[in-house]
Image: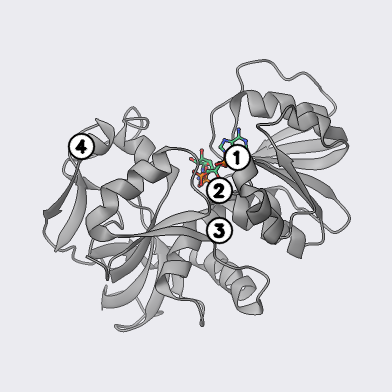
Amino acid sequence: MKALTLNGYDGVASLRIAEVAAPEPRPRDVVIQVRAASVNPVDGKIAQGYAKARMTLNFPHVLGRDCSGVVTKVGADVKEFAVGDEVWGVADQTRWGTHADLVAIDASTVAKKPAGTDHVGAASLCVAGLSAWAGIVTTGQVSSGQKILVHAGAGGVGSIAIQIAKHRGATVAATGSAKNLDFIRSLGADIVIDYTKGDFADAIKDCDLVFDLMGGDVRYQSFRVLKPGGAIVHISVPPMTQPPPRTDVAVKPAPVKYDGALLDDLGALVQSGALKPQVGKVYAFADAIKAYEHVNTGHARGKIVLDMSKG
Ligand SMILES: NC(=O)c1ccc[n+]([C@@H]2O[C@H](COP(=O)([O-])OP(=O)(O)OC[C@H]3O[C@@H](n4cnc5c(N)ncnc54)[C@H](OP(=O)(O)O)[C@@H]3O)[C@@H](O)[C@H]2O)c1
């Protein structure tokens, strides 16, 4: 089968499409024929060696966290899925990724694909959707009447976080550059802020929560927009280098749980119409390296997805 293999830590220069052996399922695995897989910023970061101190990879390695596809084999202990099921799921990054024709994934991080959503849409939502869920629902506990600010509202996670927060009844502000403001508005944001035209903290005050998808100085400046008792919630993004300028607000990391039951919750939102996948661009698998380059710019709109049926 074909796979996008990582052969070192020189970023996209270490990526090659190659023939590799097909994976066999462990007892709790399903093997999925990947129809679509998203490219997440972490894929490019791993290719550049950002995780090499804590994650040992054997080259050639296959990157890619999430996918949507069809079950082709099940392990001996898997009862909840059968060959032919259409599923979406998240792979263990240290084992074998989804940027390949086939991937073996533990059944606990797989769910039935939401009806009415195609494979490209479903693939776009696994990591980005569960990350938004972690920030807005599990850790942020955003509720009706709150005012929140989502940084990077046009990106893969931000474009989903805005929709989930609106569904929960919050007033939502989001940052982006001029070319993305209409897009961010179309997701339901009440207030759109062009971060390239001055200080975003001049445009909004008294927030209950900031969902920080940028880190660093953006997080530091975000303290200025919170009301007393408010919180900055963040997933894994670059840390702040300065000490926190306020003690009357909280900073909460939001661990992202990759879990089939949470995918079911996310899928229910999609089926209700409250959440729509946001696919910025679809690349044929043969153009996977171009897809990585696109994501590496840090300025993708929505999620970038590989369509395995194309090339
Ligand atoms: N498990 C985890 O902890 C986890 C999971 C998923 C993601 N993450 C991390 O979360 C971050 C966001 O992920 P993502 O998938 O949403 O990234 P992404 O899709 O690559 O984000 C791109 C977006 O960021 C916007 N942006 C860039 N600079 C900005 C700025 N200064 N202010 C506001 N917006 C800005 C861009 O908008 P413009 O083009 O308009 O500038 C673009 O739409 C990444 O660092 C990723 O690694 C962590």
Residue type (three-letter) at the residue carrying disc 4: Ser
User: Residue under circle 2?
Assistant: 155
Q: CA distance from mark 1 to mark 3?
A: 13 Å
The amino acid beneath tag 2 is: Gly
> Which mark, by number, is residue 129?
3
In the figure, residue 118 lies in which quadrant?
A: bottom left
Which residue is tagged 4? 14
Observer-nearest of 46 and 274:
274
User: Answer yes or no: do the residues labelled 1 and 2 have beta carbons within 8 Å?
Assistant: yes
Q: Residue at x 66, y 41 (%)?
A: 151
- Dot placed on the residue nearer the N-terminal end, 1 or 4: 4
- Assess mark 1: CB under 8 A from ligand 1? yes
Residue beneath disc 1: 213
Q: Is residue 249 left or right of residue 74?
A: right
Label 3 crowd (10 A; few <14 / some 14-19 / many >=20): many
Q: Is residue 69 above or below residue 56?
A: below
